[in-house]
Image (cartoon, helix red, strand yellow):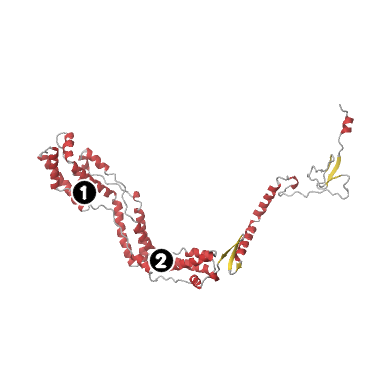
Amino acid sequence: MRTGIEALYNAPMLTRYICSHCGRRFEAEPKDIMECPGCFWSTTVKKEEDAEEKSFEPRVSPPEKKSFKINFAKISVRTLPFLILFLATGVLVANWPKVSRFLQQREASLRSKKMNGRAVIKAGDLDVKIPTLDQLSEEEKATLNRRIDLAADRPMDEEEIKILRSMASLRTGKVERLPSQAWTIEGYKQMIAEQEKFYKVPLPGSYKDKLVDLFKKKYLPAEEAFKAGNLLEARNLWVESLAFPIYGKTLEKHRGVALTMLRLFINDTLSKIGAINGTLTEQKVRDLEQSLIENYTEFRQLVDEKSWPEAAASALKLEQMIKQLETPDQLPTEVPSYPPAVNQVDEGIRTTLVNLLHSNPPAVTDLASLAQDVAAKKNVIESFLPENLAKVKNRYDQALEFIRLQNWQEAEKLLRQIEYPPSLVRDSQEKVKVLKKLQKPAP
């Protein structure tokens, strides 16, 4: 075991050092590269005996300020790139308005350069050349400088006259005839006689008289009501014509004999009732179609009279009616219920009658041609309204002012918004062609 003297004797020799960067003094074993334990610098560490005391002035840290401070001495080599990127981003964000203004000025400077009479925009090693105003032909310059005068009492263009004189066709989907010919009294009697012969079952004369009497009272008046256009009355009478008197003493015999022999008549009458139900289901749609036809006639009359404000209002009403007809599923299409006499009809026939109340959605007339005709006429009509004419004139004048200022893009945008009158539309389209040339790189 070593004694204290031996340990002291064998202890390494320490040398005193001083750091001229942070002024720290410390002891350490001598080695080739000595780092300061305070700031980790090595180039500023010297032996204390080699340093000149009189010239040594330890650095004094300035008073601490309340601001963000980074001790670069404690930053490792690995974190240094991230710190540089962070600081660069901060500087860029803080000075972004100036940087953005510089970039815009730089871009404007590049675009304003000219070479051989053409504007030049540099993009890498490629020069994109755009024609200048001086390189346009005299005809193109005249097109840009041309001004079309608009007046409220201007004469109609040939194209406008053609549009206003055109007429769209519209046919209603209303049922105008039955799916089969109506029965006559002679045909009805003949049918009964043929059925008696076929089934070899003669019906009592009294029962046949009852059938004929029911036919005269209900079926024939139904046919007359249909011809007069009273569809609901016709349908109800045909329903009542199916309330046959009971044959025999039992319901089974009635169904097995009478209803079997009358099956042709029953099925034909049911088909007529079903057809009328379909028409009644569509009645609101057909009424709207008829109203549409009437309003279209009035609309054309207002156009012929050149009553532009009234014609514009009529066109708007027509467009609303067309939109309503194009969505018939939103219209109420309930079929009126049968008369109370339906309860006197045999249960089997009555079940079929109830099923006939549920008709398919109504078919709608093709309104495409009418909608196009109204839209075209409305476009012409609106061009004669003073308030619309003023708006178009103002837009046109603004476009010409942008052309004078050589702001081609804004001028083109305004000219593309002009939809009437045709003379102004044609002039705007010709100007747009020239403006596109001024914005398109030369080949």
Residues packed near mark 1 inside 10 Å, few (<14), some (14 to 19) or many (20 plus): few
Q: Nearer the viewer, residue 77 or 276?
A: 77
Label disc, if present, on residue 383 of the rendered structure: 2
- Whether 403 is drawn above or below 332: the answer is below
Amino acid at circle 2: Ser
* Image quarter of residue 292: bottom left
Residues packed near mark 2 inside 10 Å, few (<14), some (14 to 19) or many (20 plus): some
The image shows residue 109 at horizontal and vertical percentages of: 62, 64
Note whether residue 177 is visible. Answer: yes
Q: Nearer the viewer, residue 405 or 193?
A: 193
Quadrant in which the N terminus is drawn:
top right
- Could you tell me which residue is drawn at 49 percent across and 64 percent down? 414
The image shows residue 198 at horizontal and vertical percentages of: 14, 39
Q: What residue did someone put label 1 on?
A: 180
Q: Nearer the viewer, residue 226 or 267?
A: 267
Note whether residue 394 is visible. Answer: no
The image shows residue 98 at horizontal and vertical percentages of: 65, 59
Q: Nearer the viewer, residue 335 or 187?
A: 187
Query: In the drawing, does residue 292 fall left or right of residue 422?
Result: left
Q: Secondary structure at mark 2?
A: loop
Query: In the drawing, does residue 56 fall left or right of residue 204?
Result: right
- Could you tell me which residue is drawn at 34 percent across and 53 percent down? 325
- Whether 145 is drawn above or below 173: the answer is below
Q: Given this view, does label 1 or label 2 mark the residue nearer the observer?
A: 1
- Residue that protrudes farthest toward the top in the picture: 1
Count every numbered label the image shows and give the total.
Answer: 2
Label disc, if present, on residue 201 of the rendered structure: none
The image shows residue 281 at horizontal and vertical percentages of: 28, 48
Amino acid at circle 1: Ser
Quadrant in which the C terminus is drawn:
bottom right
- Whether 138 is drawn above or below 218: the answer is below
